[in-house]
Image (spheres, grey):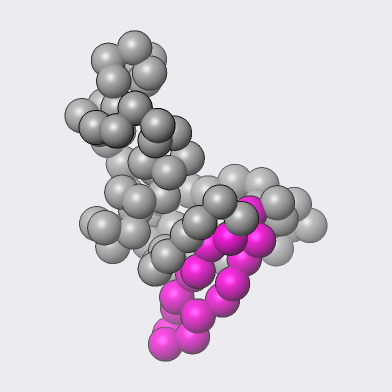
Amino acid sequence: MDKTQNLQDVFLNTARRQHISVTLFLVNGVKLQGLITWFDNYSILLKRDGHIQLIYKHAVSTIMPATAIDLQEQLPDDTVKT
C-alpha cells in the first residue's frame, strides 16, 4: 500500500470499490444515503436512485457503512488498532 494514503481515503475508496451503501450524517443533522461514486480532498459524490449529490466534506459529521469495512488488510499493521 502507498504510505501516503490516509485512513479517510482508504475507508472511502473501499466503500466505493465494494459498492457498500453508506449513510452520511451532516453537521446540520441531515442524513444522506447512497453509494460513493467518487471523492477527492474536498468533496464526495453520492449516488441514490439515479441521482448524484455533491457533498462537501467539511459538511460531513459521520459516515456509517451499511456493512462492516475491514481496513486491517489495507493499512500498515501499526495504523489500525483492534
User: Is 10 above or below relative to 79?
Assistant: below
User: Is 61 above or below relative to 2?
Assistant: below
Q: Position of residue 2 (x, y in %)?
A: 29, 33
Which secondary structure type mostly characterizes the magenta part of the structure? strand
Image-based side of 60 in relation to 16, left or right: right
77 drawn magenta: no
Viewport quadrant of the N terminus:
top left
For this orientation, the residue located farthest to the left is: 73
Viewport quadrant of the C terminus:
top left
Name the residue rendered at 31%, 49% in the picture: 14
Residue 52 vs residue 39, the one in the foreground: 39
For this orientation, the residue located farthest to the bottom is: 50
Q: Position of residue 26 (x, y in %)?
A: 69, 56
Per the rendered image, the range of residues in magenta is 43-57
Name the residue rendered at 33%, 59% in the picture: 16
Name the residue rendered at 37%, 41% in the picture: 10
Please indicate, yes or no, whether residue 23 appears anywhere in the rendered image: no
Q: Position of residue 17 (x, y in %)?
A: 26, 58
Q: Position of residue 20 (x, y in %)?
A: 32, 58
Image-based side of 8 in relation to 78, left or right: right
Please indicate, yes or no, whether residue 36 appears anywhere in the rendered image: yes
User: Is 53 above or below relative to 71?
Assistant: below
Name the residue rendered at 42%, 87% in the picture: 50
For this orientation, the residue located farthest to the top is: 78
